[in-house]
């Protein structure tokens, strides 16, 4: 297990470029299984979760060629169906939550798929009912082994249908779309997730020969085709990393420029940080956070305290709540955070409280943060990263704290942020990685 030793109090300044979007990468890499043609994808973030998924595809028989950093070609011509249906495959899938999105492509192309209980962050209940109900609606049959947790899905032919999803699950929507593109007839998905990652998946599938309308809405219509072909695709910059850089720049900034942000795809994220009192300037496709010493949280028009909550797109992504909470600890003002979508993501605030932050954890979903306005710096301490997003929030807190903090289990941060210590050190941070 690796740790970060973080010397706090160093201001960040300069320029940084966000990596490719992790969540999009997991989706489009799984989609390469839908064709025997070659799919060339660029701007792939070489982070732990993505690298593990690529290794899993290699084990299934996909030919993977790395041309350079983030530049890969995938050719899924000869798939080892024996491995795909084996317990070894299930074991490998269980280590990586993104592997669940292989089910739709395998079912569409090979008429059989094996699903495991996938791994990933321990941030509360993340059920797979939406995936399974959608695939059953397309004609798949399910056999569940309660002892092993394996679920075998099969369908001699998928058939299009109308479905109203019980929740706008991003991975569930992606799985159903990938299964439906080669189903017989027309599939209509209502209450579909419509995040930019889903939009990008749909655009890539269309470039492969799929017929999809309603992209960017929650009503998606898919007309099935017999086969798909190869294509090229470039992944968007990661909106969560962009938001993380905005938050740490506000707390530590000597002036930071975030390059090539695809601002049109950030949705409500910049405005949410503006509500926190953070000055954001836009120049072409770059975000500029100027140098300043304090930021004041807005109130609502009637004078009541600001409430920030997550919601399905185009609402605020839940992945940024942790970053916003730590950013609020040094603002001027009070804000209520309501984490609606996951019930265990706020427990990391105990670490911030022990560092001196004024936070009231109301329940597993709500926390009130009273900002210090930089008058009472956070104090260094030893912490453990519980998941990707809490991990980056604790790193931001440690960089702003007095003294040297130690963050253990930073492999969790590695799963979502590539070479983060090296990149932040280039901006002026003092982070040392130790084993």
Image (cartoon, rainbow, N blue to C red):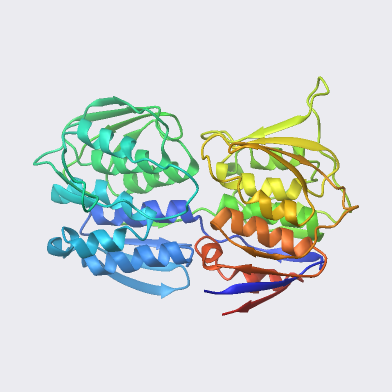
Foreground of the two, 96 or 363: 363
Task: Please provide percent x and percent y for residue 248.
Answer: 73, 57
Q: Residue at x 19, y 50 (%)?
A: 113
Q: Residue furthest top?
A: 302
Report which quarter residue 82 is drawn in: bottom left
Q: Residue furthest left?
A: 156
Task: Please provide percent x and percent y for residue 170.
Answer: 42, 41
Task: Please provide percent x and percent y for residue 95.
Answer: 36, 61
Q: Is residue 113 above or below residue 3?
A: above
Task: Please provide percent x and percent y for residue 249.
Answer: 76, 57
Total labels: the figure holds 0
Q: Residue furthest bottom?
A: 435
Foreground of the two, 312 or 405: 405
Q: Is residue 411 above or below residue 116?
A: below
Foreground of the two, 55 or 376: 376
Can residue 227 be seen here? The reply is no
Residue 38 appears left or right of 304: left
Q: Quadrant of the C terminus?
A: bottom right
Q: Residue at x 85, y 57 (%)?
A: 377
Can residue 339 be seen here? The reply is yes
Residue 287 appears left or right of 90: right
Q: Residue at x 46, y 52 (%)?
A: 23
């Amino acid at each position: 297990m690796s740790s970060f030793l973080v010397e706090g109090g160093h201001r960040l300044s300069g320029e940084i470029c966000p990596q490719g979007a992790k969540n999009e990468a997991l989706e489009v890499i799984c989609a390469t299984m839908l064709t025997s043609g070659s799919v060339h994808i660029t701007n792939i973030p070489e982070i732990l979760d993505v690298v593990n998924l690529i290794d899993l595809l290699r084990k299934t028989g996909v030919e993977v060629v790395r041309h350079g950093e983030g530049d890969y070609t995938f050719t899924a011509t000869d798939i080892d169906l024996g491995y795909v249906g084996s317990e070894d495959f299930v074991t490998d899938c269980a280590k990586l939550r993104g592997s669940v999105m292989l089910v739709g492509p395998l079912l569409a192309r090979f008429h059989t798929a094996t699903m495991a209980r996938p791994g990933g962050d321990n941030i509360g209940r993340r059920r797979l009912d939406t995936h399974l109900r959608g695939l059953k609606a397309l004609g798949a049959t399910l056999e569940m082994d309660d002892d092993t947790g394996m679920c075998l899905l099969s369908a001699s032919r998928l058939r299009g249908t109308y479905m109203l999803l019980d929740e706008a699950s991003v991975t569930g929507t992606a799985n159903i779309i990938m299964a439906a593109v080669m189903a017989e007839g027309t599939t209509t998905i209502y209450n579909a997730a419509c995040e930019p990652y889903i939009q990008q998946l749909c655009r890539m599938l269309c470039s492969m020969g799929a017929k999809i309308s309603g992209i960017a809405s929650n009503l998606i219509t898919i007309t099935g085709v017999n086969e798909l072909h190869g294509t090229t695709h470039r992944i968007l910059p990661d909106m969560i990393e962009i938001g993380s850089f905005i938050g740490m720049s506000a707390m530590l900034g000597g002036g930071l420029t975030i390059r090539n942000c695809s601002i049109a795809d950030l949705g409500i994220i910049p405005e949410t940080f503006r509500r926190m009192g953070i000055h954001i300037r836009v120049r072409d496709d770059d975000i500029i956070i100027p140098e300043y010493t304090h930021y004041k949280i807005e109130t609502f028009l009637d004078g009541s305290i600001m409430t920030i909550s997550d919601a399905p797109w185009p609402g605020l992504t839940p992945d940024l709540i942790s970053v916003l909470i730590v950013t609020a600890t040094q603002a001027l003002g009070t804000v209520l955070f309501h984490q609606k979508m996951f019930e265990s993501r706020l427990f990391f605030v105990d670490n911030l409280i022990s560092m001196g932050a004024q936070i009231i954890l109301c329940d597993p979903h709500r926390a009130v943060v009273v900002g210090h306005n930089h008058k009472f710096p956070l104090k260094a301490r030893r912490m453990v990263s519980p998941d990707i997003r809490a991990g980056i929030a604790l790193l931001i807190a440690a960089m702003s704290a007095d003294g040297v903090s130690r963050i253990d289990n930073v492999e969790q941060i590695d799963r979502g942020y590539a070479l983060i210590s090296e990149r932040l050190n280039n901006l002026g941070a003092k982070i040392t990685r130790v084993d």
